[in-house]
Amino acid sequence: MSISSVIKDIKGRLDGKVAIITEGANIVVADSDLKAAEACAERIKEKFPMHVRKHTLPYKVDVSKEDEFMRLAESRFLPQVDASRVKVSRIESDVTMNTNIKGVWYGCKYAIEAMRRNTTCKGSIINIASYTGFLGSANPQISYTASKGAVIALSRELAVTHARENIRVNTLCPGPLRTPELLNLLNTDDKKNRRLCHVPIGRFGEPIETAQAALFLASDESSYVTGTEIKIDGGLTAAYVTSEDVCTSLPPKNYFKTTVEKK
Ligand SMILES: NC(=O)c1ccc[n+]([C@@H]2O[C@H](COP(=O)([O-])OP(=O)(O)OC[C@H]3O[C@@H](n4cnc5c(N)ncnc54)[C@H](O)[C@@H]3O)[C@@H](O)[C@H]2O)c1
């Protein structure tokens, strides 16, 4: 957004509000186009000579490059990054982002191409995000959380784009499922209970409960359902405070039929 449009946009919107800037403000104007950043910094200094300090700095930064962002964040005019909050390594972050966002995007892209070639039936794409696409976590998992939000957003957009081609796109958002990985991670009662206290139903989900929602989306029963998210999360994303009653909810019967009784 250009500085002139920002200033025009602000007019009238802050009437009656009071902003206090103590000791003048340092402003860093960051843009990948250094000339644009310089022009913007100059205009700020011209418009608000009494309010900004001499350090209204133009800064060249490509925000898609972590190194460049890091240099900007380490600039002496910005508060230092709190390292305790930024625990995800770049490699871990790239793998998560690439798998969860690009993986889903490539899957959609090639599925849509194949669906277009198939003139006899309609298409239903079912992506898997997570309850973390809606909620923040105090445990460091920011790449996972962000990637799941992206899956929800990209699925919605694809749904809207391809609706007239009879291609539906929806997202499943499971809550914590009783998978070996989760049970390994939550390997004490304390750790399990720390999670379960957020789940109104009071137990982890079974993978088949997510599969059943997938079945609905895959079938024509959901023929008018597109661009939406189905939360299979035991009420987790709806909850503010959950009941302290002991959990009486059991996994569905067919879970035992298909998985446990066979063993
Ligand atoms: N388990 C849960 O509690 C839970 C909760 C919410 C959402 N989800 C989501 O449900 C989906 C399935 O979860 P899960 O618990 O079954 O996971 P999982 O880890 O058991 O299975 C994931 C599978 O994906 C494969 N995989 C990983 N990276 C890959 C890559 N780059 N290319 C191809 N395959 C790759 C793995 O080898 C594994 O077989 C995931 O999208 C997960 O984020 C799971």
Image (tube, helix red, strand yellow):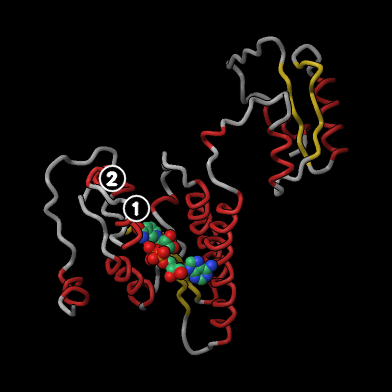
Distance (Cα) linking label 2 and label 1 = 8 Å
* Left or right for 79, reference 207: right
Residue lying at 28% horizontally and 69% vertically, measured from the top left: 208
Name the residue that disc number 2 marks.
Answer: 191
Q: Position of residue 200 (x, y in %)?
A: 23, 47
Residue lying at 45% horizontally and 75% vertically, measured from the top left: 124
- Image quadrant holding the C terminus, namely bottom left
Residue 84, placed above or below residue 128: above
Disc 2 residue crowd, few under 14, some 14–19, many 20+, Cα 10 Å: few
Residue lying at 18% horizontally and 80% vertically, measured from the top left: 262
Please tell me whether mark 1 sits on a helix, a strand or a loop.
Answer: helix
What's the amino acid at mark 2? Lys
Q: Position of residue 38 (x, y in %)?
A: 86, 32
* Left or right for 212, reference 53: left
- Image quadrant holding the N terminus, namely top right
Residue 193, placed above or below residue 3: below
Q: 255 or 189: which is nearer to us?
A: 189
